[in-house]
Amino acid sequence: MDSPLWVYLLGLAGMAIYGSRILIQWYMSEKSRKVESPGIYWVLSSVGAVVLYIYGWLRKDFSIIFGESIGYYAYMWNIGILGLYKRVPKPIIILQALFPLVILALIVRDIPTFSATFLHNEYVPLGLLLFGVLGQTVYELRSVYQLVYSYKRKASILPLGHWVMAVIGSVMIILYGLIRHDWVLAIGQFSIFFSIRNLMICVSSSRRMKSVAELLMVRPARFGFNEQTASNNRFQNDTLKDGVQERALEEFDGMVSLLKENDVPVIVVEDTPEPLTPDSIFPNNWFSTHEDGSLVLYPMFAPNRRLERDPATIRTIMAAAGTKRIVDLSAWEDDGKFLEGTGSLVLDRKSRVAYACRSPRTSEAVLDDFCRRLGYHPFLFDAVDRDGLPIYHTNVVMSIGERFAVLCEDVVISSSERSALEANLSDGGRKLIAITYDQMLHFAGNILEVKNMDGDGLVIMSDTAYGALTEEQIAAISESSRIVPVHIPVIEEVGGGSARCMMAEVIRV
């Protein structure tokens, strides 16, 4: 059946919308070296589907209409899980949901006409129609597969199986379009090249990601001095007043960019203005992930920090890590006992030792609970500042790398505990790097060794910490990993935490 030129142009417009979505998605995936599922991809998918519904109606081609119906609500689900409907008026969402039902109702309202026009179309033999429907089904079932896969993980993901089905379905649709002389359908499947490329990225990134932890970082919405944590965090200062949020955002974005430039995989979560969480920029305190698939949620000292355990962020973590179980320790808050994640804990994951210094934020009872559930041995010690007050977090006192360990011995009270720490940290051939009290105050202990996508070791620290180290200490750290200093003075000054606190490892199972 021939159609007016404007009908073909409408079909091309729908295909162009589809094409633009995968161009954007492919570009973002190439940039991050892993398959991305951006919100714009699903918005354009939904708009393109509406246009192609109309095109299929005008072309009297049931295979197009049937195919678009399969994926339509998957697009809507992904838009919803990504939080993009929050600012859309409900009547528009309702109209969007009803649109395909109205089209299908119009088609089948008169069964004889439907059969004659769509199923027994003289221009589309039944065998060819069934082949076209099968091709569209395979192609669109990728969306059903993606929906089921993502629903289980409570996050929008474009998995490997999605791209396999996209390639197979595209080949079938191209053949159908060529046989039917529908050049719009044939040309519209140019996206097969991007599907193949996404498939390749998916395979290669999954191989790399098995040995590389992603870093989850939270972009703050209302960063500022937290009075609820200041009572036992003497690293915080309320000296800066103007432009703190804006300057913190600039530092945060600069750090993320620098990490990505060094091929470190980063997941950025956007904080929300409400509820007020001034310390959300330090996500490592409220969760940790583990090689056995555990996601641990921790009891937090400050009530406003407990609000950081956001369900949407938890879903993001679970999706990225492939979480198998959640170990929720937050009930200890009811007893006034706390353990603030990898701030309170410095984990030797190979030797299964959990180091922790006592403080109002680090309870021995919760530490024992953590170790029992995760299979760690506790190493509890006392570390105090020059006024004799407990240091709020262990991760400012020490850090453990693959071939080195950093420790501020000056703050460890007991000589026997100090000796035991030195012996433990030196075990396995690690070089022990002792830092002074003043270096600790400059966050020289608040560092993290990570691996980039090529497997290279990097040590992330602030330029404040880097500037406090001696040439010998820098050389000792650099023997195993390259140092990457980040510029975050406002975050350190106001928040009382440094580079390590801003990065929470997401370990993929």
Image (tube, rainbow, N blue to C red):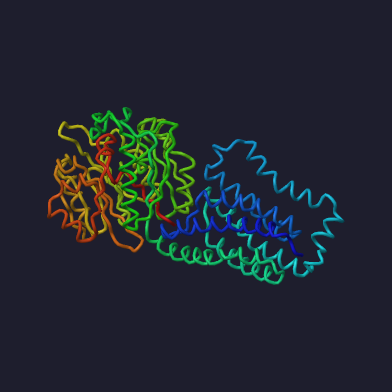
Percent of width and height locating residue 311:
49, 40
Q: Kindly give the residue lying farthest to the front in the view shown.
A: 5
Asked where in the image residue 171 lies, by quadrant, the reply is: bottom right
Residue situated in front as seen by the camera: 144 or 327: 144
Q: How many marks?
A: 0
Residue situated in front as seen by the camera: 112 or 389: 112
383 is higher (above) or lower (below) than 478: above
Is 485 on the left or on the right of 194, as rendered?
A: left
Asked where in the image residue 125 lies, by quadrant, the reply is: bottom right
Is 181 on the left or on the right of 30, as rendered?
A: right
**Image point 26% across, 48% down: which residue?**
486
Is 139 on the left or on the right of 488, as rendered?
A: right
Q: In which quadrant of the rendered image does the N terminus lie?
A: bottom right
Q: In which quadrant of the rendered image does the C terminus lie?
A: bottom left
Percent of width and height locating residue 450:
31, 55
**Image point 80% across, 62% down: which residue?**
119
Percent of width and height locating residue 43:
56, 48
**Image point 52% across, 64% down: which residue?**
194
Percent of width and height locating residue 305:
38, 34
Q: Kindly give the residue lying farthest to the right in the view shown.
A: 112
